[in-house]
Structures are given as structure tokens and as C-alpha cells.
Image: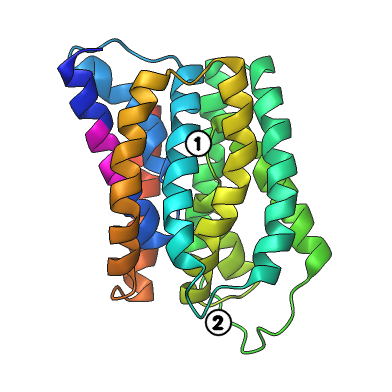
Amino acid sequence: MDISTIIMMLLIGVFGGFISGLVGIGGAIIIYPAILLLPPLFGAPAYSAYMASGLTSSQVFFSTLSGSLKARKKPEFSPLLVLYMGSGMIIGSMLGGLLANLFNATFVNTIYIIIALLALILMFINIKPSLDQSSFNKPLLVMVGLFVGIISGIVGAGGAFIIIPILLVLFKLPMNTVVANSIVIAFISSIGAFIIKLIQGYIPLEDALFLIIGSIIFAPLGLKLGKKVPSFVQKWIISILIIIAIIQIVL
């Protein structure tokens, strides 16, 4: 493993970890295309879609773990919300991780783009948050979690980039509640995908190590800064990242 690859993995991990903490996502929305596209630009060997998916799953797992340890101390944290949506997602992500072997790289990239576009559309739907946050539609939380988990498992993501707009639009939760809980839900979801891809041999451990180090260090810093960032700014950051990621994959 050469020095350029080490530096590149560190920087990708730093950025992904910081973003995961800042807006409550796992970082996969930008990490996956970055791992696919950046190495060849700097003369390093290119990763296959399967390896990029595996590396992404490792980054998401550790960055969301790091961010979750901080997020669960927030007053907006809801164990009930995390339990029901997270349980559906961990089952779905393991199933998606197994199904990913059945698809080629083009299909995996297409799924990624479709879900990213859906997330982008939902981000621009303006829904007034519900004042009653005392109860949740538990069956719907589990079903939505299962669906998002399957998609997340296929592309190696934690799924927070689609969890956030769903919680905002479908469940009408305020942005601060969504950010506090989505990163924990993404962590639970990432467990299944990470384990499956590790067993399948799609996570090159040396490369993943530096990606993870950068993520763990900077996720809590992003979370700390996120407390001071207005909700509409967080929405725009997520939307811009989704647009950049789609452009990178398409081109």
C-alpha cells in the first residue's frame, strides 16, 4: 500500500466522518463515488464497485458508531424511533448485502443513483413538522426500515441519506430530531452490511484502516458543529452532496 493511497483514504475518511456528524448521515452518499473515482486520478489502482461498496460499509459503520456515542446523549434522541426503524434496517441491510452478489456493478450504481435522486426530491418537499412527537407509527417504521435497509445493504451504505428525507416528509419530524436519531439508525443498519461484506472479502483491511481512522476522529467534531448549524443549512448541505454524488457516478 503506497503513501498516496494512505493519504487518500485518510482524507476521504476525514471528510466522510465530518459530514456524518454534521448532518447525521453515514457519509456513504459521497464516500462511495469518491472511492470509485479518486484513486485513478492520483495514479492509484482503481477499486471495483464491490470493493468500493465494502470500504464504504466499513467507513459508515465506524463513523456512525463514533457519532452515535455522542448523539444518544442529545435530548432529541428517541430510543423508540431508533428501535423500530433500526430493527427493520438491520434485517434489510443483511439481506441487501447478500443480494448484492447477484447484481453487476452497473446495477449497483443504478440503484445508488435512483435512491439518491429520490432522497433529493424528498429534501425539497416542504412539510411542516408535527407538534405531536409522543408516538410513532411503529409498523410503518419497521417496513420503511426494512426497505431502506435492503437498498443500503446492496450499495454498502448506512442509508441515512434516504432516512433523513423520509423522517422529515413521511413522519413529519423536526430537523434536529432527525439528525440526532438518523445517525444512530444508520449505525444499526450498517452492522448487517459491514458483517456480510467483511465475510464476503470485499473489505481490504489495510485500506479500510486509514479510512476508518479519519472517520472516527472527525465524526464527533462534525456533530459538535452541527448543533450550531441552522436546519435549512443542513438540508442544503445534504442536497448539494447528493447532487455531487449523482454527477460523479453519471460521469
Q: CA distance from mark 2 to mark 1?
A: 27 Å
Residue shown at the point (50%, 41%) measured from the top left: 61
Instruction: Please state which of residues 118 and 65 is positioned toward the viewer in this rendering.
Output: 65
Q: In this figure, which residue is indicated by the disc labeled 2? A: 128
The reply to whether residue 5 is in sight is yes
Q: Secondary structure at mark 2?
A: loop
Q: Are marks 2 and 1 in contact (CB under 8 Å)?
A: no
- Of label 2 and label 1, which has the lower sequence position? 1
Which region of the structure is painted magenta?
10-16
Give the main secondary structure of the magenta stretch: helix
Q: What residue is at 72 percent from the left and 41 percent from the top?
A: 92
Side (left or right) of 9 relative to 114 = left
Magenta highlight on residue 12: yes
Instruction: Between residue 35 and residue 119, name the one nearer to us.
Output: 35
- Residue 117 in the image, given as x and y percentages of width and height: 50, 46
Instruction: Say what amino acid the circle numbered 1 marks.
Output: Ile
Residue 224 place in picture, x, y as percent: 31, 68
In the rendering, at what x and y percent does residue 60 appear? 46, 41
The number of numbered badges drawn on the structure is 2
Q: Tell me the amino acid under the disc marked 2.
A: Lys
Q: Position of residue 126 (x, y in %)?
A: 51, 73
Residue 113, numbered circle: 1
Q: Is residue 71 magenta?
A: no
Residue that appears at 34% across and 44% down: 215
Label 1 residue SS? helix
Residue 26 can be seen in this image: no
